Amino acid sequence: MWGVRPATLLMLAGAMWPATGVGGEGQTTNSLRKIADLDNLGAVRILDVRTADACLAGSLPGARCLPFDHFVGAGGAVIGYVQLRWLLGTVGLQGDETVVVVGARAADSQRVGALVSGAGQRRVWVYDKPFVSSASLQPGTARNVSRETVFTAPMRDFVDDEGG
């Protein structure tokens, strides 16, 4: 009805990463209305992974701007989990919240969703269409340079495609 389907696998750095894990739940949706209804799930945080300029120009209510390029280093490789957990703390995430990831490209949103899930985030939803803001939306909030809180969720176990 809402266009929601379970996300059992997301692509991450050339390996398949399960979107669900111990205490975790991963979902994708193509309905902004479904995202708006997530308030019933408890503490919901929106991560807008578009460029900072696009996010600051207009995003979903309460969105934090965390551009996709913050998740990749030189040469396009994803950042390490130590840096990732620090980065998530700069937008006030501890790991026990429900996170919704929106971005300009569905592939970027899915990659960030997989990273955040792997870092141990309790529940991650990914909007699987390009998010385009309108003039009626409010500006997103830029991330801090330092942590607002410490990301404390335990990381999920990772099993690579070699079985170990």
Image (cartoon, helix red, strand yellow):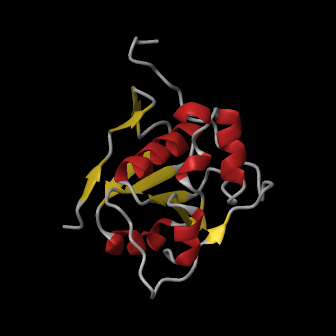
Quarter of the image where the N terminus is located: bottom left
Above or below, 83 relative to 40: above
**Position in image of residue 164 (x %, y %):** 47, 12
Horizontal arrangement in the rendering, residue 127 relative to residue 75 (left or right): left
Answer yes or no: is residue 162 visible.
yes
Q: Quadrant of residue 16?
A: top left
Above or below, 11 relative to 89: above
Name the residue at 40% across, 11% down. 162
Above or below, 155 relative to 62: above
10 or 145, nearer to the observer? 145
34 or 50, nearer to the observer? 50
Name the residue at 46% across, 20% down. 159
Query: Outermost residue, front direction?
Result: 75
Query: Outermost residue, left direction?
Result: 1
Horizontal arrangement in the rendering, residue 74 relative to residue 105 (left or right): right
Name the residue at 64% across, 71% down. 141
Q: Quadrant of residue 17?
A: top left
**Position in image of residue 92 (x %, y %):** 70, 60
**Position in image of residue 50 (x %, y %):** 50, 60
52 or 65, nearer to the observer? 52
Horizontal arrangement in the rendering, residue 138 relative to residue 125 (left or right): right
85 or 20, nearer to the observer? 85
Answer yes or no: is residue 77 visible.
no
Query: Outermost residue, right direction?
Result: 146
**Position in image of residue 42 (x %, y %):** 53, 67
Q: How many marks?
A: 0
